[in-house]
Amino acid sequence: MSSNQTTNFCSVYGPVSSWRYGRSLGIDPIGTVSTCSFNCVYCQLGEIEVKTGDRAIYVPTEKILEDLKAFAPWDVDVITLSGSGEPTLALNLKEILQEIKQLTHRPLSVLTNATTLNDPDVCEALTFADRISVKLDAVSDDQLRRVSRPHPPISLDQLWQGIVRFRQQYRGEVGIQTMLLTPWDEATQAEYIRRMQELQPDEIQLNTPTRPKPLKHEFEGRGDHSNASDRPYPVRVLKQVSPEVLHAFARKIQDRTGILVRCAPTPAGVSG
């Protein structure tokens, strides 16, 4: 078992207000040491401390359930696995989802960067979730390296194959989350639209980094810290696309694919 926790660590946080899901209670199966197979340039946690694609038990299921009971009766719209890195790296993912569902009887959502979707065990575990949100910020290998910074390096083709296969097998709701740091040119937009036409997700969520990035890893970044007063640590404000650009791209995608596209709201006080 990994030692990604401390005595005072709580694996449950929130509820946070999400423009995508409403009131969401967060579950962190990774722990206090940020651990991820991506090191995204915009990550709200700051720089990822452990960059890996290896799965392990980072937080015991019993610890998560113990923490979760303190939040009863779970008056939220959804319970979401995310937290301090890539949640599907948790080797006890299936057990976590099964036990949370049995305990709370609330809808379960998992946020993933898709790097594990070629693993049959991960895909089986995810069948116990009601909704999977898949990050896709790139449509070329160069863009993937610059924005998502995967570790170990993987190709976009590998990532995409896992997403497509998972979409074909999974019976729950699949959303695609895409972050735009700068406006995309016509060729990049066209390739993205082509891929969405192939994938046919239930919805697409377009975002731009409204949250500044901590200059170093900040554990509290996993929660809802949209207001500057909630961030007692130094941050770097990131480039954003304008609401006009974001909504224009959303309309183009929806017109050409028929897929529901939702955009991040402009008010700074609303969490992504």
Image (cartoon, rainbow, N blue to C red):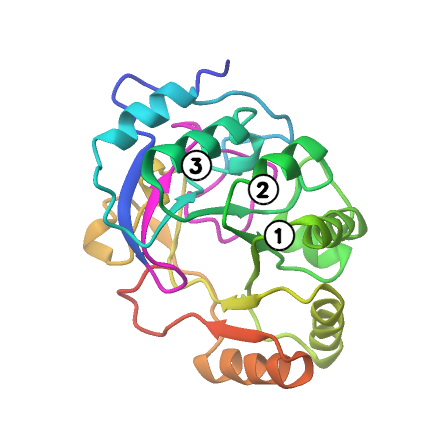
Judge depth for marks 3 and 2 and give the one in front: 2
Q: In screen coordinates, is 89 left or right of 58?
A: right
**Magenta stretch holds residue 8:** no
Density class for disc 2 (Cα within 10 Å; few <14, some 14-19, many ≥20) is: some
x, y percentage for residue 131? Answer: 51, 52
Kind of residue indicated by mark 3: Ser
Q: Residue at image x 67%, y 60%?
A: 138
Per the rendered image, the range of residues in magenta is 18-47
Q: Quadrant of residue 13?
A: top left
Going from N to C along the chain, the mark reached first, 1 or 3, is 3
- The span from disc 3 to disc 2 (Cα, nearest Å) is 22 Å
| Residue 41 visible within the image | yes
Going from N to C along the chain, the mark reached first, 2 or 1, is 2
Question: To which residue does mark 1 refer?
Answer: 171
Going from N to C along the chain, the mark reached first, 3 or 2, is 3
State the mark number for residue 127. Answer: 2
x, y percentage for residue 221? Answer: 35, 44
Q: Residue at image x 29%, y 23%?
A: 66
Q: In screen coordinates, is 102 left or right of 231?
A: right
Q: Please say if the residues under marks 2 and 1 sit with CB atoms less than 8 Å apart.
A: yes
In which quadrant will I find the C terminus?
Answer: bottom left
Circle 1 SS class = loop
Q: Please say if the residues under marks 3 and 2 sit with CB atoms less than 8 Å apart.
A: no
Question: To which residue does mark 3 refer?
Answer: 84
Reply above or below: 63 against 175.
Answer: above
Q: Nearer the viewer, residue 62 or 161?
A: 62
Circle 2 SS class = loop
Q: Residue at image x 73%, y 54%?
A: 168
x, y percentage for residue 259? Answer: 61, 75
Circle 3 SS class = loop
